[in-house]
Image: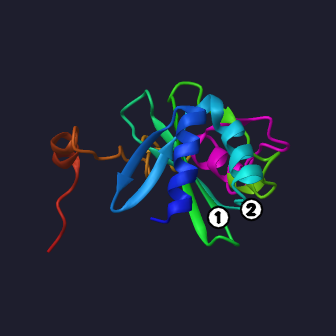
Amino acid sequence: MSKSLQDYQQQLARAFETQTSEFAGEVSMIVPAAKILEAAHMIHNEFGFDFLSCVTAVDYWPEENPRFHLVYFFRSLTQKLTLSLRVPVPGISPSVASIEPVYRNANWQEREVYDMFGIKFEGHSDLRRILMPADWQGHPQRKDYPLGYEEPQYSFNFDEIKARKPAPKE
């Protein structure tokens, strides 16, 4: 990891009480949901990360607090650096501040996360479905969303679901 990226992570940790998470050699900063807009301002204005390359979410169902993590990837094209932030979001009434005022391209990315996961972005200029029809019920990327009228199979209900599934024909 570059020295400047480590410096940015240390500044974020001091300013926003972030935690560091490392997986497969990739480091992410875990930022409280209440501070994401301030963190985005700092990343853009002070650190020079001029491009928001991705906003997505991870569903940890059946956990409820936090049920989701929002994942942000910020890119500095001039420094050739990528900074990753994760924001824990509760499962009941999931919402977080929009970073659209800082990164204009967050508009469609936040709309996609809203459409697929049901996480609301407070202060978003046009928060409505972008992929699914406007009258669609539910959020298809949630782990508890039924697949083809079939209950999702997980480790905690594996035996119960397996007993009800028809055996494949040979």
In the displayed structure, does residue 90 sit left or right of residue 123?
A: left
| The one of 134 and 90 positioned closer to us in this rendering | 90
User: What is the basis of the colouring in this image?
Assistant: rainbow
Residue 83 screen position, x and y as percent: 56, 57
In the displayed structure, does residue 58 sit left or right of residue 108?
A: left
Residue occupying image coordinates x 22% and y 44%: 155
Q: How dense is the environment of label 2, judged by Cα within 10 Å: few (below 14), some, or many (20 and up)?
A: some
Residue occupying image coordinates x 35% and y 46%: 152
Upstream in sequence: badge 2 or badge 1: 2
Q: Residue furthest toward the right? A: 125
Please tell me whether mark 2 sits on a helix, a strand or a loop: loop
Q: How dense is the environment of label 1, judged by Cα within 10 Å: few (below 14), some, or many (20 and up)?
A: many
| The one of 165 and 1 positioned closer to us in this rendering | 1
Residue 55 screen position, x and y as percent: 62, 54
Looking at the image, do the residues carrying marks 2 and 1 touch, with CB atoms under 8 Å apart? yes
Q: Mark 2 and mark 1: span between their CA atoms?
A: 6 Å
Residue 136 lies in what quarter of the image? top right
What range of the chain is rendered magenta? 110-138
Residue occupying image coordinates x 34% and y 56%: 23
List the residue tagged with mark 1: 75
Residue 163 screen position, x and y as percent: 16, 46
Q: Amino acid at mark 2?
A: Asp
Residue 154 lies in what quarter of the image? top left
| The one of 14 and 16 positioned closer to us in this rendering | 14
**Quarter the N terminus occupies:** bottom left
Residue occupying image coordinates x 77% and y 44%: 128
List the residue tagged with mark 2: 50
Say whether residue 133 is visible.
Answer: no
